[in-house]
Each structure stands twice: as C-alpha cells, then as structure tokens.
Image (cartoon, grey):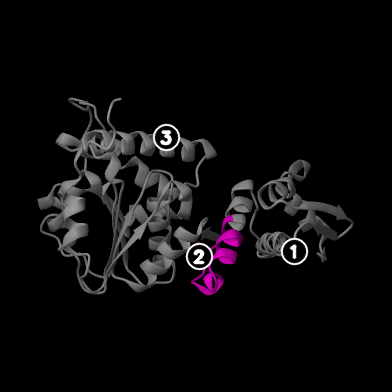
Amino acid sequence: MTLEFPDNQKLAALGGAHQKHLVRVEQKLGVRVATRGNLISVEGAPESRERAAGVLRALYARLEGGEQVALADVDAEIRFALHESETPGAAEFGTASIKTAASRVARARSPAQRAYLDLMRTHPLVFSIGPAGTGKTYLAAAYGAHLLHERRVERLILSRPALEAGERLGFLPGDLKEKIDPYLRPLYDALFETMGELCVRLMESGVIEVAPLAFMRGRTLARAFVILDEAQNCTSAQMKMFLTRLGEDARMVVTGDPSQSDLPGGRPEGLNEALATLAHVEGVATAHFSDKDVVRHPLVTRIVRAYQDKEATARDVRRGGITEE
C-alpha cells in the first residue's frame, strides 16, 4: 500500500526525529513503513496495513490543522485504530478533539477518553473513576475550558478536598490562599496545560475559580461547569453537599481513584456511596478507566497494574481463595 502526502515539510514532521513516529507505528501494528519523496509505503497483513494507513492519515490531518505531533499523539492514534477495528462503529462514536482557547486544541488520547468526552457532552453529572494517569482531571478541565470558549457556561469552578496524602503537614505559613494553594496545585496545572496564559486573566477576573471543597457549602452554582477532583477523599456528607450545589444550566464532573483514598481507614465512603445511590438516576453517567487507559509514561501503566495485582492477591487471601499447602 502506498500513501501520497503533498507537503514534504509536513511529511518530515509526521515521521518525527530519526523517523521515531514511523518506527512506533511499525512496532505497534506489525508493519513495515518506508518513505520515498512524498510517498509512504506500508507493507504487512491487509488489516494491519489499513490500521497503519489510518493512523498516518490522521496524524497528517493534525499537521494540516496546525497542530504539532508528538510520540504520545502517535500512540493515541494507534489506540484509536486498534479499538475501532475491534469495535465496529467505534469510529463514529463522538469526536476526539475540543477547542479550549483561540489557538489551543485538546484531544482524547484513548477510546475511553473519547467516551468520557461524549458523556460530558450529554449528561449534566458525570463521575470519572479510574487510576492515576488516565486523564480524568485533565480532560474535565479541558472540556470546561471548551464550554467557556464556546460561551456555553459563564464560569469554570474547580474544587477538591484539602486533605494530606498520608502525611501530617502541620501548620502552614502564609495567608489563607497560601495555605490552600498546595492542595489545589494539580487543578492549576490542568488549567494552564489546556488554556495557557488565558487562564491567568480568567482567574483574576473570577471567571475561573479554584477553591477547597469546604468553600462550596451554602452556594448555588448556576451556569457553571464544576469539577470535583480527588473525590475519593470526600466523606458522605461532603459529597452530598457538593452534588446538591448544582444550579440552573450547570454541569458537574466528579473524578476519583477509589484505590487512593486518604480518608481514615482508606475507604472512599463518599464516592462509593454516591456511585451506588445515583447509579440509576436519569442525567447521571459514569466513565470507567483502567490501567489500559493510562496515558502518562509507559512505566506508570506497569506500576498501576502491579499494585492492582497485589491488591487482588490480598483480597483473595482475605476471602480464603488461597490456601497454604
């Protein structure tokens, strides 16, 4: 199979430094890729060739749209190609990109992330559950930025419980903002990554607000996109309080990893109770992520999987599933 691309400069960007993008396509899809001028030839099994061709066309389309292509983007397109070939009709399920600012676009990097985007489009309340590194918070912040950019909401509000991760930090110096900022830093990071310098101006004007969960009590959040991060650290009372803040024309996303609760006893009571109680309530949806959906460094996937295997073995021991000989 031979593919023709009209712009040699974009074709060079498609290949990446030392052709590492094409090498990744070869490794993941079991094909051989060669370039000659503005042509790319793909050799291999028919199905693998079609997948590789789809990945290369999608990456070239990104370049034509003015985007940059990194190795993570190559991996994302490969995941989509594999998923769509295994799941008929998956290619028509939603769109993988959203505009978050005048010159910024955020993209889903896995089929699970694309499904998550679709749930946020169609449901006023979405729970996002899964391990670290799956893009739960980043994509929620990106979608909130998208709604702001489209003027479909007036405010973006991000919150999380101010709870230490297994440590006792004691007295923190400074005024109230300086005391709580360390707890909210991951939310600031997600906003800056999706919006750039625009984020600073919107925060100064109050359009974007980042606040601890305790500051939500008594408020009614109307015409806003509201994100509760690290929800596994919410008590039942805190979760109920937060969910009932939903006002007119508002949307909410609740993200959490039940395996990383810092509550006493390590049990994510507020999150688990909300998931069970609202499972069949109209307008509520849940996006589930697994270790297969981790989009950080490949080692993070292996770390998450190793801990999950260890926890599964411990549960089997407690249930008597493993006996000593």
> Disc 2 or disc 3, which is closer to the eye?
3
Q: Does residue 303 sit above or below 20 in this rendering?
A: above
Q: Residues within 10 Å of mark 3 (few under 14, many from 20)?
A: few
Q: Residue at x 47, y 54 (%)?
A: 194
Residue 77 horizontal/vertical position (percent): 61, 58
- Mark 3 to mark 1 CA distance (whole Å): 35 Å
Which circle marks residue 306 in the picture? 3
Q: Does residue 186 sit above or below 47 in this rendering?
A: above
- Mark 2 to mark 3 CA distance (whole Å): 36 Å
Range of the magenta residues? 79-102
**Can residue 44 be found in the magenta stretch?**
no
> Disc 2 or disc 1, which is closer to the eye?
1
**Can residue 93 be found in the magenta stretch?**
yes
Residue type for callout 3:
Ala
What is the quadrant of residue 39 in the picture?
Answer: bottom right
Residue type for callout 1:
Pro
Residue carrying label 1: 46
Q: Residues within 10 Å of mark 2 (few under 14, many from 20)?
A: many
